[in-house]
Image (cartoon, helix red, strand yellow):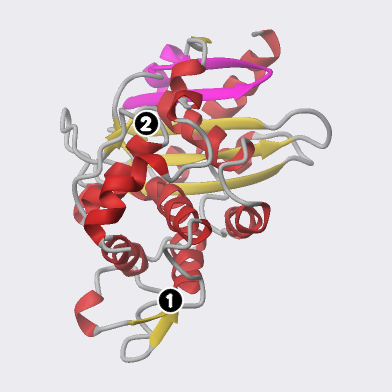
Amino acid sequence: MDRRTFLASAGACMTLPAASARSSMPEPALLDLAWLEARHGGRLGVCAMGPGRVGWRADERFAYASTFKLFLAACVLDRVQQGAERLDRAIPIREGDRVPHAPVTGPAVGSSLTVEALCKATVEISDNPAANILLRELGGLETFQAWYRGIGDAVTRVDRYETQLNSALPGDPRDTTTPAQAVANLDLVLLRGMLAPELLAKLHTWLLETPTGPGRIKAGVPAGWRVAHKTGTGARNSYNNIGVAYPPSGAPVLIAVYYTGAEASPEALDAVVAEATRAALVALQRA
């Protein structure tokens, strides 16, 4: 499938109708986190959904940074299940692909990596060249944007490659989404059967095994919970985390936390994300 054909068909290749995305979800109940912003500074956006749905600044835009890589991998896996891509296809890694943070692709320059290996590197270790290569192989930014629209997401913007997309300038709508939209997309991708089981299992494993962000959502859930997640870190101390948290029993909780603009240490910024997670879980019990 060439780029033009994929762009034309991106909205029709999903196994779920576009109407099953966020448009069918109720508005979240208010999760008041003004106290957390007042204590630490910055702007915080949260949406969580389990039995109930809560949010704080849930419909405000935030620069998503590397959290988009979860959905980029989902887009690639969606193409695989449509027969437009193969996980075992080898892609040459060239010197010109280098950008900062290349723990997997850097040592592979001059050789090749499979589509599956690039997806794994993108999600687990947030390898930036891997993400850019996958975007290029999709057909570019327009194709990825069309995929979002095809799953019913009219909010998320795709404007730049790594690492420029991390600029997080105040009021800049480029490369942004909202917490509510992120949760709606997580719901489709991780819980509602968008991907075939064997492909979903791969994505889920990468999200569970990522070593990034132990002080964020993972630090905010009770002991015994498992978290499949993707972090994102950008300019202006943007500290983000999205994913699904599984209690020992009962329904999973989808959560998206975006935090930006505070002046604090990395550990303190992580702790705010964890505290927002704890507050969201408490509020869900009351929703």
Between 238 and 144, the one lying in front of the other is: 144
Point out residue 189 in the picture as x, y percentages from the top left corner.
Answer: 54, 41
Identify the mark at residue 153; answer none if there is no mark.
2
Identify the residue position indicated by label 1 in the image.
Answer: 104
> At 61% across and 26% down in the image, what residue appears?
278
Q: Secondary structure at mark 2?
A: loop
Task: Report the quarter where the C terminus lies.
Answer: top right
Point out residue 136 in the picture as x, y percentages from the top left corner.
Answer: 26, 64
For the residues labelled 2 and 1, say whether their Cβ atoms are less than 8 Å apart.
no
Disc 1: CA contacts within 10 A as few (<14), some (14-19) or many (>=20): many
Point out residue 9 in the picture as x, y percentages from the top left corner.
Answer: 33, 47
In front: label 2 or label 1:
2
Q: Is residue 60 above or below residue 116?
A: above
**Three-letter amino acid code of the residue under disc 1:** Val
Q: Is residue 60 magenta?
A: no
* Residue 264, visible in the rendered structure: no
Q: CA distance from mark 2 to mark 1?
A: 31 Å
Q: Is residue 37 magenta?
A: yes
Q: Is residue 85 left or right of residue 204?
A: left
> At 48% across and 31% down in the image, what residue appears?
17
Point out residue 24 in the picture as x, y percentages from the top left corner.
Answer: 50, 17
Give the magenta range.
33-57
Mark closer to the chain start, 2 or 1: 1
The picture quadrant where one finds residue 243 is top right
